[in-house]
Amino acid sequence: MTEPPYFRHAKSPELGVCILIRKLSDRRTYLFEDGVERSFKEDFCERFIEPAPPPDAEVRVRLGRGMGSGGATPKAIHLELEAAIREKPQDAEPYLVYADWLQERGDPRGELIAIQSKRQVAPDDKKLQAAEAALFAAQGKYLVPPLLAEMLAHPRRKTDAPGTRTTASWFMGFLQGVRIARRSEQQPEPATILEELVRHPSAQFLRSIVIGPLGATNKFDFKPVVAALGQRLPPLLDELVIGDFGPEHIELDFTSLANVSPLLAAPNLRRLVVRAGTLRFDAPIEHAALRELSVTAVDLTQKTIGRLIDAAVPALEVLEISAAPLDLEIKQLDKLLRRKDRTQLRRLALRHTTKTATVFAEIVRSPLMRQLEVLDLGDGDMTDAVVELVERHAEALGRVELLLSGNRLSQAAAVRIAKLCGTVKIGKQGTRNALTAMQVLSRAPDARSAAAARELARPAEWLVVARDGDRIWGEYEGSNHYYVFARLSTEQTGCSCPSPKNPCKHALALLLIATDHELPTRTAPDALIRNTQSRPRYTSLWE
């Protein structure tokens, strides 16, 4: 990163060097090496603020950390002691040496390190808790990034959805992990919080960043977050999670992340988890330290799937890929299973696959099977025919934890597989149609419709829900009596409600019910056919 130009105050050289941090139409603001921001009128600057040679290394670093960090310029820094901490960031000893040096120079961080060191031994000590709280109360503006402090100070409300609170963890006087989440769009933008956070002196040893809900109602856009991190990734960052949210916040389909590749620039990254409706890798995936790579999306292009399979990540222990659907070509699957640089891989998750039985068979017969500890093929289209394969390879499968929830196994097949294998989690199975909840909600016209459909997808609240061939139908009593239907083979829908949206929330809810319940077989009444055909937008959908 290019260093800023340095200046000095010609009339007061004792103030030391400074850097320009803000320029308005009639005045400029400079950050001086004593950590104080001073503003001067434009004409004064022209006469008395002059260029200066770069100061020594520690002053340059202090000014760099103070710029853009909310004015928290370090009172004192020792570059050699900080280098010792970076060598062993989980070792308390170099922090304690630094604490002594900082306390001698009146830097509050020295006291914070000392208190938090004692709390490592006695976390429930009331006096230590009170001392830490008092220090944060007195020196919070110096120790905590302002926007992060604002987010942390928000009181929790009963109406807040779970997981919408920002949290932070500390280790020996420095931020160790931060989870940024918004409960509404009135709170600061996560990208802006990150831009300030990664420049703050307290975050120089930051190891974990998690981005949760964004507080929007119609769309989560994580692209600004990636852009902010791409400009300045914390050097010790070893965990990065983007998309830590659930359907109670927003449906996956209404989120976007775009290009993930810049995040791999963090040299010490061990765990990367990304979740969004759409995402991609614009460059080949290469990382020497990465141990866990988890990618969940509604739509993954073949190019992105190819890059995940071709990833040069020799330390990888966990690989998870989920899409709706995940359509793996045989050549891709064969390459994934027979790579000689996957010697560390212990957990493989391929979720929402098509032709899941074929995927399962290829994995079981591959050399990779001998080293796997967990195999997750959840939410696929596996049927009872797979039992024969399990019987033939029961010995190999006995060493693996097998996760098969969300497939289409009968209860009898599930019991048989559980007896043949070692650790099996069958979980809830899907219905005999291949439609999944993720696929249904990806058809919602907007996030509000998706959320409303989830609320309505309770069979007990409907007057009737039933199946007629490959069609499902239902009657719902809302502000009026509504007739609803859908074809499972084509996903065509119809509803007698006045909503201009297609599909409406009732049709989406009916499809959601079908993904999770076996419906009774009943012939659709004439009234339903007449009412759903009466509206022009549904003409000819129900014959």
Image (tube, helix red, strand yellow):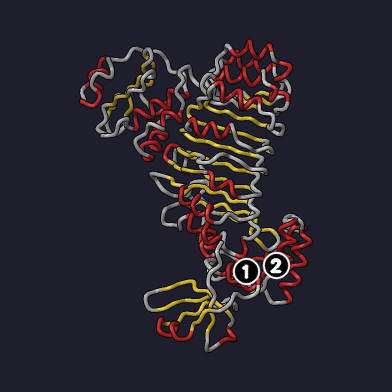
**Disc 1 on helix, strand or loop?**
helix
Return the x and y of residue 359 as percentages of the image width and height: 58, 20
Q: Is residue 527 left or right of residue 205?
A: left
Camera-side residue: 296 or 476?
A: 296
Assess disc 1: are there few (<14), some (14-19) or many (≥20) residues with their C-alpha within 10 Å of its C-alpha: some
Which residue is labeled 1 in the image? 61
Which residue is rendered at x = 49% and y = 52% of the image? 227
| CA distance for labels 1 and 2 | 9 Å
Residue hosting label 2: 79
Residue 520 sits above or below residue 98 on the image? above
Crowding near pointer 2: few (<14 within 10 Å), some, many (20+)? few
x 44%, y 49%: residue: 215
**Residue 131 or residue 396, whichever sits in front:** 396
> Left of 144 or right of it: where is 445?
left
Please provide percent x and percent y for residue 118: 76, 62
> Looking at the image, do the residues carrying marks 1 and 2 touch, with CB atoms under 8 Å apart?
yes
Foreground of the two, 289 or 128: 289
**On the rendered image, what quadrant is the N terminus found in?**
bottom right
The amino acid type found where label 2 is placed reads: Leu
- The image shows a total of numbered marks equal to 2
Q: Quadrant of the C terminus?
A: top left
Is residue 514 visible to the viewer in this orientation of the structure? yes
The answer to whether any part of residue 531 appears in the image is no
